Image (cartoon, rainbow, N blue to C red):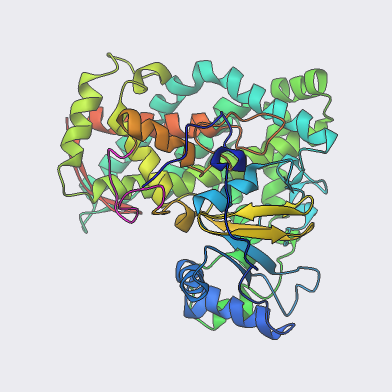
Amino acid sequence: MQLPPSSPSLATPSKWQPSNLPVRQIPGSYGWPIVGPLSDRLDYFWFQKPESFFRKRMEKYKSTVFRTNIPPTFPFFSNVNPNVVAVLDCKSFSYLFDMDLVEKKNVLVGDFMPSVAYTGNMRVGVYQDTSEPQHSKVKKFCIDILRRSSSIWVPELVSNLDIMWDGIEESLSKSTSSSASYIFPLQRFLFTFLCKTLLGADPSREPKIAESGYAMLDRWLALQLLPTVSIGFLQPLEEIFLHSFAYPFFLVSGGYNSIYEFVKKEGKQVIYRAEAEFGLSQEEAVHNLLFVLGFNAFGGFSILFPSLIETIASNETGLQERLRKEASEKGGSQLSFESVKEMELIQSVVYETLRLNPPVPLQYARARKDFRLSSHDSAFDIKKGELLCGYQTLVMRDPNVFDDPEAFEPARFTEEKGARLLDYLYWSNGPQTGTPSEFNKQCAGKDFVTLTASLVVAYLFRRYNSIKGNSSSITALEKA
């Protein structure tokens, strides 16, 4: 493994320079119209699945950069162009962050964009490019929300975790199958916690929202993304009914409108700041808040936490004892953002989980102009308007950057060498060492995500000596 020199706060292709590589024509093909995209779609969703889909083409073309098609495609997506240039190593993937070379307008999930009806008939900040004036307003607003919430973040996290794990313990004690599902308790916890911290809104004030708000967000998220994800449904029924057309908003409009009214009523102070300090209208503020709450925060944590719990709860190598020791011996008597920063192994486990299982596996960007892109061994000419697609699950297993990249190494990101590797941890639409701002598209809550996940691990091992389970259920808990 040979790392390039340490990079600036936001890693871009310049960090890999100088580069004198042979210029190569981009391998791969889009195939015949309709037939090529449909064939790739069936491989992606059915015959190969996403990771194998990219691996097989990478092996076939002997390149981490190649042309292919990404769903959704034919028959009812006539306005979507599935043609992409895949970038599957850390070096080529880093071009997705260079806002001088690429743009991010309407490419959150590729060339397909869910109907704006899902977001109040407006393009919320995540679909806006940095060149659009509105993007700066929304991004600054999001950063401000997180900054202001920091004073209550940890107390709310801990108090709501207490409620969640008390409930799981009770369910486990009553279970006849010696297991307790934690998915719905986790989502209730996340919904309440995030509403209080991000919106200053307490769901308990609205019984309907307190009871079903998380489920409303689940359905709203699912219908937007169904054409682009596999859910393991019986084939070919999944292809026919789930991946062939976009779902209309009216199917979830009732739930979304209920949460909208809740945010509008209970989040008045946050909305007022959006209008007074950032120049957003009330409608813009509420719909952007709902997207940050539902898509970014709730959706992201709903994927990350089960992955993190499974990684720890199924580990048989003595990792839990090391985590328990660190959690109990470091950070003082009360958890805080500062105290968890002392827990190097816990943070590394979170980083390693994000490396191997990024919550958002695909990242996209469209070429703003013609430019030359480099992988580790070749250079390629990209034309203005071409869509780049990076599959992070493979990018974060780049053997040129990570030793033994397929293995879970709990301490990978510890000590000086591990700290340098954070330059190449790209889960947040930028490197872990990057700084989110209105000038880039890096996740505004990047640091809150990793610190919150670390706090959850520290909390667990101050409460329990050991836990056993998987990505959906807990099977055993040993109290500390």
Where's residue 284, x and y in %? 80, 35
Tally of numbered discs: 0
Q: Is residue 20 left or right of residue 330?
A: right
**Residue 162 seen:** no
Q: Quadrant of residue 264?
A: top right
Q: Quadrant of residue 350?
A: top left
**Residue 445 seen:** yes
Where's residue 346, x and y in %? 31, 32
Above or below, 151 relative to 362: above
Residue at 67% in and 65% down? 84
**Residue in the foreground of this view, choosing between 134 and 225:** 134
**Residue in the foreground of this view, choosing between 313 and 422:** 422
Where's residue 107, x and y in %? 71, 54
Residue at 35% in and 23% down? 340
Residue 14 belongs to the span the image colors magenta: no
**Residue in the foreground of this view, choosing between 16 and 101:** 16
Above or below, 407 relative to 243: above
Residue at 79% in and 74% down? 78
Above or below, 108 relative to 151: below
Q: Is residue 116 left or right of residue 469?
A: right
Residue 404 belongs to the span the image colors magenta: yes
Residue at 27% in and 38% down? 411
Magenta part mainly helix, strand or loop? loop
Which quadrant would the C terminus be assigned to in this image? top left
Residue stretch rendered in magenta on the structure: 400-412
Q: Is residue 119 left or right of residue 477?
A: right
Where's residue 223, x and y in %? 64, 60
